[in-house]
Every structure is written in C-alpha cells, then in structure tokens.
Image (spheres, grey):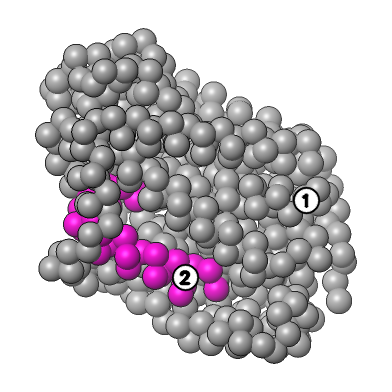
C-alpha cells in the first residue's frame, strides 16, 4: 500500500473533490466547442453518440486516472514511476506523467490566450460594443482584437496571474476555495442564460435540435468527433485528473465520484447548447458556424435582443469562470512535481511554472498576427500546439492510462483501490478499460494522424 495522504494537502470533503474535478473537466470545450461541434453534425444524433462515448470511454478512463493518482499520492511523473516499480515494470512508465505535464503546458499556453479573448469580451459586452452591431461590425471587432498583439498580451497576462495566484495558495486555501465559489457561480450563470433562452420564442426549436436525432447526418466523421469530444471534455490524459485524485480521501468512492463528475460535465455541455441554440435561431442565424459561433455569431444575437447587453456580459463571464477552473488544474501537476523534486515552495513553483506558460503563450498570440508567416508543418504556433495536444499527446496519454490500469496494475491493486469488490460493476469497468476504451481511443488517434 502507498501513503494515505499527499504531502501537498488533501480535499476537505468529497464535495470539494467533485467541484474541483468538475471544474477541471468543464471548460471552454463544453461551452464553446461542444455547441458548435454539435451544430456542425446535426445536433441530436451527435449528442446521443457523445453521451454514449462518455459512458463507455470517458468514465472508465477517468476512474482509472483517479485510481492511479490516489494510489501514487504524488505528481503524475512520480506516481507513474512509483506504481511501475511496485509492479516490477520499467521506469519508462514515468514518461506517461511527463506527457501529461507537457500536454498541460502546451494547452494552457494557448488556452490562456483564448481565455483572454473571453475576458476582453466581458468588457466589450458590458460596454455595449455589440449593441445593434451587424455581422460585419462584429467581425471587424474580433479581427481587430486578434490582430493587436499588445491587447492580446495584456489579457493573456491578467489571466495567467489569476491562475498562478490560486495555485500558489495550495490545495485547501487555493484550489478548493476557488472552485467552491467558481463552480456554483458557473452553474448559476448558465441556468440564468437557459432561462433567458426560454424567452426568445425559439427554445422549443433549440430543444428539438439538441434532442431529436437525425441519423442521416451521423457520418463516420461525426462519430469520431463525438468520441474525441467525450474524451477531451473530461480533461483526460493531461495529468490534471490524476493529481486531483492524489488529494482524494481513501474512503471516497472513485466510481461514484466519477459518475457524478461526468454527469455534471455533460450537463454543462447540454445546458450550454440549450442556452446558445435558441438565441442563434431567434436571430435567424445558422448553428453550424464552427469555432466562430461564440466570438462572431453570438455577439450579433446579443446585440439585437432585449437585455442582450446584460446577458451577453453574463455569458462571457461564464466562459471566464469555466476557463479559470480548467487552467488551475493544468498548472497544478507541474507545480506538484517542482515541490517534490526540486524542493521549491508552492509560491516559487507556481511562479516559475506560470512564467514558463506565459512565455509559451506569447508565441501563440504572436502567431495570430506579427508571426503569422512563421509556420511549422504548415501551422502557426497556436494551431500547432492545439493539434499536437488534441490529436497526439492526449489520446496517447489516455490510451496508456487504460493500458496501465487494465494490463499493468495488478488486479488486486485495482480491486483494492476501486473498492468495488469483484462484483458486476468492477468486471464491467475492467472489460471497458482493457478492451473497449483502448480500441476506441486508438481509432480516434489514428484517424487524427491520418487527417494530418
């Protein structure tokens, strides 16, 4: 058996862990990416496949990642090293931990830039910039903002400072206190927007679009996209869930917690769709607008609707909160490693890690303007970091987590940690983690590489 507590601290309660892990999972992917991806692939059929993938792929891998984290009680790198040694396996398994930390670094570097957009849009919405604006005006606002490296740098810096301030305070005083405020606030803001969407006159159309499957639009590409969305929306394969699991009490049910977290994560994605699509339909706009849905299409709708100035501000504030809770979980794994292996205190470790991410983020924001001609494999830095993490590092990390939990870690160890006995629930998890999840993630991975 391993240590029962982490040197970094522990969650004070099961609720604290659920809020933190849900905060890690709930991010821009739920509120920004999920609605426009569902819009591109016809709505209801995509949502159905997405939910099935969450159940069959996401939940088993999340259970495995939490299990490994709690069993190791250290940073992902040291956890994987310790568990591999316990099982008499090569120390090279610690590379899985390194992959997660590298993924987190790269993701946070461009995530912070996009989060900066959302912060800037809070100010613009509150100031009435979008009021009465047409598509051309909104497009000019966005293009002008992205083309200005100084403004992008300012918002990127503010966001990273907010992230570092939370992580530097530690598990109990920083992470836990932040999510105890941010997650309830996020749900309240989202519910306010759903209620607002009910007043648009097109809420029934939004519900129909989200929940009436049109299987004629369910192509192979749509299925693979749903599988990828289910995997990535739960923050799997990047070390965040593993490190949060290391702070979880040994008496807390991993299976029960995971089901609640996955359920809340999926609920946020669906509520985001129910908030966004009625607003889009009410203004006669198309839902299949791609990544521009949030930053180019919704501001038009908010600018034309009664109360749009207030509710547009609320919407972008919601995005900021979602980005913030995810970002702190991405920085935590490397901070834990620096404390464990370099003897740094939390403040110094957080500052160093945050500074490194901030510098990487500068390359991302410059790739949108003055460095737009600088490309690697035909991609700017932001697009390159996004592609490498989403299509290579995260699925590969998830695949290796499934392999280690299902094939390397002893059956006795997983039975002990999951505390489910040898009953049906455990046998089902073991079947999914050993066969179904690895094959599904491998298919997503190979498809992404092929597309590239």
Say left or right for 139 vs 449: left
Look at mark 1 in the image and give the residue it sits on.
13
The image shows residue 9 at horizontal and vertical percentages of 83, 49
Taking 212 as reference, is 342 above or below it? above
Residue under the image location 34 percent in, 38 percent down = 275
Look at mark 2 in the image and give the residue it sits on.
55
Taking 403 as reference, is 116 above or below it? above
Residue 150 picture quarter: top left
Do we see residue 84 in this rendering? no
The image shows residue 224 at horizontal and vertical percentages of 30, 68
Residue 302 belongs to magenta span = no
The chief SS type of the magenta part is helix
Residue under the image location 35 percent in, 24 percent down = 312
Secondary structure of the residue carrying tag 1 is loop
Dot 1 crowding, Cα within 10 Å, few <14, some 14–19, many 20+? few
Say left or right for 164 vs 275: right
Quadrant where the C terminus lies?
A: bottom left
């Amino acid at each position: 058996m391993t240590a029962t507590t982490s040197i970094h601290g522990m969650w004070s309660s099961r609720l604290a862990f659920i809020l933190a892990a849900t905060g890690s999972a709930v991010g821009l992917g739920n509120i920004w990416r999920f609605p426009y991806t569902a819009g591109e692939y016809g709505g209801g059929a995509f949502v159905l496949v997405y939910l099935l993938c969450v159940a069959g792929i996401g939940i088993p891998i999340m259970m495995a990642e939490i299990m490994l984290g709690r069993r190791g009680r250290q940073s992902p790198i040291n956890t994987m090293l310790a568990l591999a040694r316990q099982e008499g396996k090569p120390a090279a398994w610690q590379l899985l931990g390194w992959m997660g930390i590298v993924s987190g670094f790269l993701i946070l570097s461009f995530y912070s830039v996009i989060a900066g957009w959302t912060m800037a849009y809070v100010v613009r919405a509150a100031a009435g910039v979008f009021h009465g604006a047409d598509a051309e005006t909104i497009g000019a606002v966005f293009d002008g903002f992205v083309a200005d490296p100084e403004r992008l740098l300012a918002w990127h810096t503010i966001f990273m400072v907010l992230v570092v301030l939370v992580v530097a305070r530690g598990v109990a005083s920083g992470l836990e206190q932040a999510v105890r405020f941010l997650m309830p606030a996020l749900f309240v803001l989202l519910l306010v927007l759903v209620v607002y969407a009910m007043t648009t006159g097109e809420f029934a159309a939004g519900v129909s679009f989200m929940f009436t499957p049109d299987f004629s639009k369910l192509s192979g590409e749509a299925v693979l996209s749903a599988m990828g969305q289910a995997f990535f929306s739960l923050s799997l394969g990047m070390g965040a869930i593993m490190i949060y699991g290391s702070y979880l009490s040994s008496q807390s049910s991993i299976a029960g917690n995971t089901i609640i977290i996955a359920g809340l994560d999926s609920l946020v994605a669906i509520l985001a769709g129910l908030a966004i699509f009625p607003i889009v339909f009410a203004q006669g706009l198309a839902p299949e607008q791609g990544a521009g849905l949030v930053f180019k299409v919704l501001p038009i709708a908010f600018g034309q609707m009664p109360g749009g100035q207030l509710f547009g501000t609320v919407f972008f504030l919601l995005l900021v909160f979602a980005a913030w809770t995810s970002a702190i979980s991405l920085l935590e794994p490397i901070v834990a490693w620096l404390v464990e292996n370099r003897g740094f205190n939390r403040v110094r470790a957080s500052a160093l890690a945050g500074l490194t991410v901030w510098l990487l983020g500068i390359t991302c924001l410059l790739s949108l303007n003055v460095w737009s001609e600088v490309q690697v494999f035909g991609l700017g830095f932001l697009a390159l970091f996004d592609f490498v993490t989403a299509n290579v590092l995260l699925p590969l990390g998830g695949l290796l987590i499934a392999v280690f939990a299902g094939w390397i870690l002893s059956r006795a160890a997983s039975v002990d940690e999951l505390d489910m006995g040898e009953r049906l629930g455990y046998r089902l998890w073991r079947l999914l983690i050993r066969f179904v999840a690895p094959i599904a993630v491998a298919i997503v991975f190979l498809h992404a590489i092929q597309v590239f």
